[in-house]
Amino acid sequence: MFSQATKYAIKSVIYIWTQSLEDRKVSAKEIGQKIGAPEAFTAKILQNLTKAKIVGSIKGPNGGFFADESHANFNLKDVVKIVDGDQLFSGCSLGLHKCSEKNPCPLHFEVVKVRKEIDIMLTSKSLKHLAVEVIKGQTHLGNII
């Protein structure tokens, strides 16, 4: 369902939140190691997430990536849109340029229903909430934490 970059981004942000809730900042290298992604690719993803203010970063010896209350309202949809754009949420699933409510493709109305469900799933919990669930053991991120 998600691109590899989006999967890495989601894991990265949840990992950052789990560490931030313990008052730790984490490096791109550490995040890459934890999520099983190349460091340079992880750094690029984190750069985009920081630019979009999904997470914060501080440079220097005591720096790293973090999340705090200013990042608390972001959700999975925000991450997906930053990494992969709006494609999952808009446009014709068959790639037709003139697909619309008035001129639907064969899949249009079914895709509209599915997109509504996906939207609910991706916006129902904040990234912070997802991290808290991981910390409490209600969900897991594999061997990441």
Image: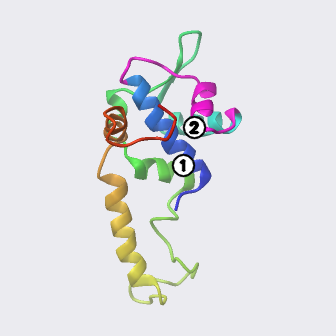
Three-letter amino acid code of the residue under disc 1:
Lys
Query: Could you tell me which secondary element the residue under label 1 belongs to?
Result: helix
Query: Could you tell me which secondary element the residue under label 2 belongs to?
Result: helix
**Left or right: 83 as drawn, with respect to 100:** right
Instruction: Give the mark nearest the N terminus, 2 or 1.
Output: 1
The residue carrying mark 2 is 35
The residue drawn where x is 45% and y is 65% is: 89
Identify the coloring: rainbow
Q: Are marks 2 and 1 in contact (CB under 8 Å)?
A: no
The residue drawn where x is 44% and y is 18% is: 24
Choose mark 2 or mark 1, whichever is in front. 2
Mark 2: give few (<14), some (14-19) or many (20+) Cα within 10 Å.
Answer: many
Q: Which residues are magenta?
A: 21-39
Q: From the top left corner, tell me how far across and down residue 2 is, in percent.
A: 53, 57
Q: From the top left corner, tell me how far across and down residue 128 is, in percent.
A: 34, 36
Q: From the top left corner, tell me how far across and down residue 64 is, in percent.
A: 54, 20
When asked about the image quadrant of residue 132, the answer is top left
The residue drawn where x is 31% and y is 41% is: 138
The residue drawn where x is 41% and y is 49% is: 76
Q: Nearer the viewer, residue 127 or 34?
A: 34
When asked about the image quadrant of residue 71, the answer is top left
Can see residue 54?
no
Three-letter amino acid code of the residue under disc 2:
Ile
Q: Which mark is residue 7?
A: 1
Asked if the magenta segment contains residue 22, the reply would be yes
Can see residue 106?
yes
In this rendering, is residue 44 above or below 116?
above
In this rendering, is residue 102 above or below 24?
below
Q: Which mark is residue 125?
A: none
Mark 1: give few (<14), some (14-19) or many (20+) Cα within 10 Å.
Answer: some
Quote the CA–CA distance across marks 2 and 1. 9 Å
